[in-house]
Image: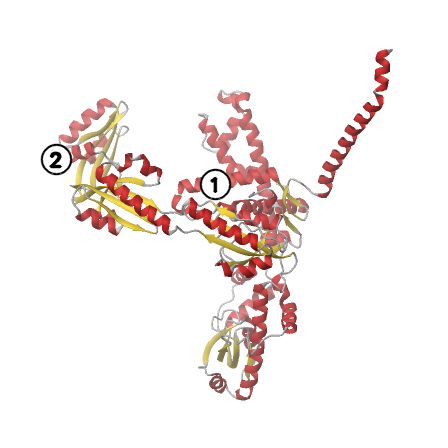
Amino acid sequence: MATLEKIRSKSVLLIVVIGVALLAFIIGDAITNSRNLFGDQTTVAKVGGSKIDYMDYQRKREELNSQLENARRQNPAQFANYDTQVLPQMAVDQLMGDALLDQAVADAGIRTSPTQLSYYIFDQPINPRLGEIMQQLQASNIMVSSPREAYQYITNPTQYGLTEAEMAPFQQYWVVMQNETAKLVNRNTYQRLLMGTVRANDLDKKALYNDYVGTRNVDVAYKPYGNVSDEKYAPSEKEIREEYNNVKGQYKVDELTKEIAFIAVTIAPSDADKEAASQLARQTAEAMRAGDASSNKELRKEGVVVTHRKVREKDMNNGAVKDFVTTAPKDSVEIVTDNIKGFTVVKVGPRKVEVDSLQLNIVQVAGEGLATTTLASLNSGLSIDSVSSTSPDSIFVQKEQWISLYNANGATGALDASQVDSLVNANGKYITLVTSPNGSVLATVTEKSAPKTIYEFDEVNYELKPSTTTINEARVKLEDFLTANETAKLFEENAPKEGYTVKNVDLNASTPAVPRMAGMQSFYPDSRQVVRWVMIDGKPGAVSHVYESKDAMSPALYAAAVLSSYDDYVPLNNQEVLNSVSDRVRKSKAAEEMMGEYSSQTSSVASAATAMGVEPRNNASFRFARNPQVRDAAVVGQIAGSKPGEVVLVKGDSGVYAFQVVSENTENFPYTDSQYEQQYFQLVNPNLGEMLKGAKKYKNNIYKFEAGD
């Protein structure tokens, strides 16, 4: 009873504890559900109803990274400096294109037939994964040579002495590949159908033909606006606003966009850094005079790189190094360069005169005993043309093969020194270059290059970079500036006073990093983190903290201030838009004045040209379709629509034109239906991605998953 009373006395407390736990569970569940209802936490991007999940995005990122690594291995010179900041958005673009295409395929009800699937797997493979399956089979010592043979092994393993268990992973992989191939075929089918909708009708094709064969003999006088005076043709706020409304469609944006003021501080080595490098150069030279600099740990710790070189004179790219090495006596040491880029110190070694290439007759012999008899036969006078016939399956010959012993990087290692000596000293006899239980390589010299002087020397290089002290000083200065200028307005106004160059840049979530120049795919290193701050945390008026590029040789500091934010049209207060619209108004006002000035002097194009102070030009074969002489599209249209005789004065985008159509002509070119069908397609230049996207709203969440601070 006592125990029961204790339980009863605690019942209220238990109810409270259970209630709190239950409430926490309900609240937690509500929060989770609200995430699902009001924001998909794993969606990287979406267009309309098509979404990219984070796991799919990660797989695509890994795939692109792998492709880049392979490209770097195969072509290091081209891809060594490839900007990896573009990979995240590249992954999103590819996935979104696929998602839109798959949705369109589903909506159209496109399906791949078994016959189609078989063709695109066995006869015309289109899925790279099929090649991976075959490689994996071969790596497992199953030597398949075709997709059909691979399929036989995978689906009928017992027929080839294999077990179902051994082939189970391949069977699963095959099903994945098969499903992927069906999806690829579906996509290709829809793409062909969609692109096939962009077809010219007979009127379209005939219009293109007529625009090309119809020519005009036109006299033209053209006066460019040049630099229009802002003072003389100053636009009013009303005029600017009206012109902006006229051309507003040019400034439509598809995503939330933010205009920022951006500072990039490139940190150069200081005078103190330069003096420290010069001191290090002197220490390096002393160490080289005393012995081998490559063994000096203190120098290597400072970043000097020691290279032992053995090269021909023509392969020395540095002129100062070449001049010193080719003239100074052995063991001489000199600092040959010492500047803002760093220094180079050289110690001269021995010189030798050697041939840098040999032409050889090479005989490869399988089997140890056969090599001995073949060598004897060759040295007894048997020709290389005849030797392979003595044992066709075991002897292979290569005649007059040039072997380079040196190239631009030095000794090639194609032959070692003892092999070269043996060949040169054999006096035309064959020698055994390589031998093993499996066979031998026999060779003789048929021709030698002219002897070259080979220079041997030690070269020490040091690249000067800003010290930690220099970087920290630049950081402190920028941080002090940001502390004193905490609003975007102050940031933009006062940066030039402190010696900073401010760039106005428009960013959205699809911008891979801060671009160096408008419209260019060249970005500031490590500036993706700046875009992330702008798109996630940067409110209009806010100023960022200092961001740093980790490029060791060219370190940089960044800061940004958000000036404005918009998701429909770039506003008129955007400096580039304001400048462009204001310029249009000024040119229009200048054009009206010029038109009034020249209108009374248009009895002929020649008189108009005299009034303009320009030379008239004659375009004997003016075409509406192709006309490089007149660049202004509106003027081209007016010329094409004018009849012969009248002198027309018209204002264009870049200047004022006076023109007269002298005569019309029709050239005799044959009409080919297919040619103008193709020209129409090229003229329209359909964009598959934009056709699939249409008017769907695009939202990119990539910076919620990428490029943290």
Compare residues 645 and 638 and report the one nearer the observer: 638
Q: What residue type is labelled 2?
A: Asn
Residue at figure coordinates x 37%, y 52% from the top left: 271
Residue 427 numbered tag: 2
| 394 vs 200: above or below | above
**Residue 559 on image: x %, y %:** 53, 52
Asked whether, in this view, residue 270 is left or right of residue 294, the answer is: right
| Within-10-Å neighbours for mark 1: few <14, some 14–19, many 20+ | few
Q: Which of marks 2 and 1 is nearer the N terminus?
A: 1
Q: Is residue 82 toward the left or the right of residue 594 in the image?
A: left
Q: Name the residue under label 1.
A: 67
Residue 101 in the image: state x and y as whole percent.
62, 47
Q: Could one spot residue 20 in this view of the protein? A: yes
* In the rendered image, the vertical position of residue 379 relative to residue 260, given as above or below: above
Q: Nearer the viewer, residue 362 or 33?
A: 33
460 sits to left or right of 581: left
Residue mark closest to the camera, 2 vs 1: 1
Q: Quadrant of residue 647?
A: bottom right
**Among the 4 quarters of the image, the one containing residue 112:** top right
Label 2 neighbourhood size at 10 Å, few (<14), some (14-19), many (20+)?
Answer: few
The disc labelled 1 sits on which kind of residue?
Answer: Gln
Q: Quadrant of the N terminus?
A: top right
**Residue 288 point in image, percent of width and height:** 24, 39
Q: How many labels does the image show?
A: 2
- Taking 322 as reference, is 649 left or right? right
- Residue 509 visible somewhere in the drawing: no
The residues tagged by marks 2 and 1 sit, at their Cα atoms, a distance apart of 51 Å
In this rendered view, identify the residue nearer to me: 326 or 677.
326
Q: Where is residue 636 in the image (x, y as percent from the top left)?
A: 54, 73
Rendered residue at 28%/50% (across/down): 337
Q: In this view, does 88 lie above or below 362?
A: below
